[in-house]
Amino acid sequence: LDNSAFTAQLEEKRLALLEAEMTLRGAQDLDAIETDQKVTELRQHQIALDKATLLAGVPADLLTGREVQDRQLEKKRAEVAVDKAAHDLAAQREEAALDLKVRQIELDKARRAIEAAEKTIAELVLAAPRGGMIVVEEHPWLGRKIHTGDTVMPGMGLVSLPDMAEPMRVRAEVELDGERLAQRGLALGARHRAHALDRACDGIGRVGVERAGARHADGDPAVIDIAQLGAD
């Protein structure tokens, strides 16, 4: 079946997937860099706090009153800086996790779109369950065989795979008399049935073969059961 509408979109979907993958990798790299920066800042502030704590621990009788106050103030400032750096690091990690989650959702969406398109394309390929000859079905409202380019609907029969072990039933477009059929090696059974008839006959005169409303001589649609088909 025609899958051009889906194959045309499939390439666009693949490009969208590639873009989503690149965006995700870029976001991961950028978030890692920013997180490392926050970790470095926290370590620097922690070192400054350790230093300020050490200086503030010097006995007061060895320092002037002003030095004691300055060192205690410096310690407080270092503690505030450490708390802020720790808060910034936690916020950065939370923001990075949320950003990566959004990027991953976009990537998964792009992958599902490709999977859905590929599944649809695969479903538009008719695969026979076994080898054999196929028969193209009649179009339900056009009164002819289904042609390339016809619009079909879900549930509509397109082709069938007849059982070749069953007696063959032929529907032709021509009219041939019994003598000409015999000359062509078409061995007809002694009994021939029409759809609406329940009778037997020893031969066939002119047979009106059923196609698009064609009729037998008595008005009934004719269908011939063929017992054997010659080499011709």
Image (spheres, grey):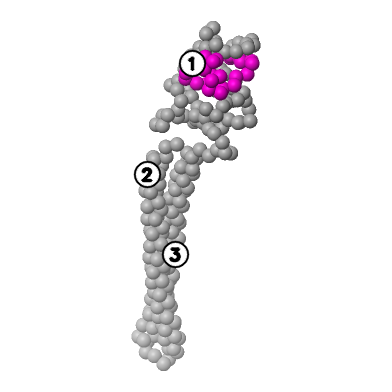
Q: Quadrant of the rendered structure where residue 23 is?
A: bottom left
Residues packed near mark 2 inside 10 Å, few (<14), some (14 to 19) or many (20 plus): few
Q: Position of residue 84 (x, y in %)?
A: 40, 69
Image coordinates for residue 29, horizontal then vertical, percent: 40, 66
Q: Amino acid at mark 3?
A: Arg
Residue 223, visible in the rendered structure:
yes
- Spot occupied by residue 177 in the image (x, y as percentages of width and height): 52, 14
In the displayed structure, would residue 34 be above or below residue 23? Answer: below
* Residue to which mark 3 is pinned: 93
Classify mark 2: helix, strand or loop.
Answer: helix
Marks 3 and 1, how far apart at CA: 85 Å
Please indicate whether residue 15 sits to the left or right of residue 163 in the image: left
- What secondary structure predominates along the stretch shown in magenta? loop
Q: Earlier in the sequence, mark 2 or mark 3?
A: 2
Answer with the quarter of the image where residue 181 lies: top right
Badge 2 amino acid: Ala
Q: Secondary structure at mark 1?
A: loop
Answer with mark 3 or mark 1, whichever residue precedes in sequence.
3
Q: Residue placed at 39% from the left, 83% from the top? A: 71
**Residue extent of the magenta highlight:** 171-195
- Whether the residues at callouts 2 and 3 have beta carbons within 8 Å, the answer is no
Discs 2/3, front: 2
User: Disc 2 versus disc 1: distance between alpha carbons?
Assistant: 47 Å
Q: Position of residue 142 (x, y in %)?
A: 43, 21
- Is residue 86 highlighted in magenta? no
| Circle 1 crowding by C-alpha within 10 Å: few under 14, some 14–19, many from 20 | few
Residue occupied by mark 2: 8
